[in-house]
Amino acid sequence: MNPAINDTGGAPGYVQLTLGRTRLLLPRSELLSLDAQPVIGPAGNDGSVGTVPLRNEILPLYNFDEQLQLLHEAQDDRRDCACLGHDSKAIGILCDKAEVVDGTGMQVIPLPACMKSMHTPVEALALQGTKILCVCNLEGITGLISALRGDGTP
């Protein structure tokens, strides 16, 4: 775990998760920890690929492909884990790369209402140089997990 991410003095405003060619951008305030090569515990019945310890809790660990579909197993080449939390929700997400990024110079463009759906957590697109990032938050991701499981529960 990287203890420096808990230092909020002058910290960047976002965490970027890379899933193949897809780059998710989430609020830095939802980041609980970044971990390279996490210790993965057994999977549950919740669509997770396993569990990951964080402080005194065990969080479900999810793995998405670049189309944001749930994968049912961990990939050996995915070495990073971002633990995200807000209110009473907390999860881990396996990714190719997880990093805290500075939002300076980033242009955020909200998605039109006709493009929003419960099948995508993306709320906006962010342009940073030549990169296009999909802006979302933990609530959107847990809503997507619930929709993909088809059970209506986060």
Image (cartoon, helix red, strand yellow):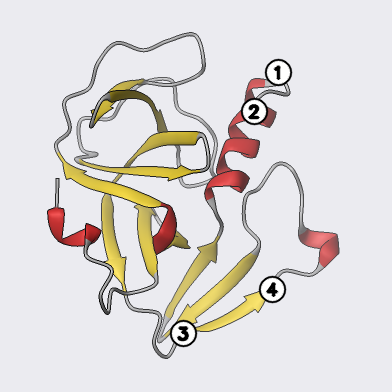
Q: Which numbered disc, 2 or 3, marks the residue that appears first in the sequence? A: 3
Q: CA distance from mark 4 to mark 2?
A: 23 Å
Q: Which residue is mark 1?
A: 151
The residue under the point 55% across, 54% down is 137
| Quadrant holding the N terminus | top left
Q: CA distance from mark 1 to mark 4?
A: 28 Å
- To which quarter of the image does residue 61 belong? top left
Q: Which residue is mark 3?
A: 106
- To which quarter of the image does residue 52 belong? top left
Confirm or deny contact between disc 1 and disc 4 (CB under 8 A): no
- To which quarter of the image does residue 59 belong? top left
Q: CA distance from mark 2 to mark 1?
A: 6 Å
Q: Which residue is mark 4?
A: 110
Q: CA distance from mark 1 to mark 3?
A: 36 Å
Q: Which element is circle 2 on?
A: helix
**Three-letter amino acid code at the position of disc 3:** Met
Q: CA distance from mark 2 to mark 3?
A: 30 Å
Confirm or deny contact between disc 2 and disc 1 (CB under 8 A): yes
Q: Which numbered disc, 1 or 4, marks the residue that appears first in the sequence? A: 4
Question: In this image, 27 relative to 102: left or right?
Answer: right
Q: Which mark is residue 146?
A: 2
Q: Which element is circle 3 on?
A: loop
**Three-letter amino acid code at the position of disc 2:** Ser
Q: Position of residue 41 (x, y in %)?
A: 25, 16
The residue under the point 42% across, 34% down is 91
Mark 3 surroundings within 10 Å by alpha-carbon count, few (fewer than 14), some (14 through 19), many (20 or more): some
Q: Residue furthest bottom?
A: 105
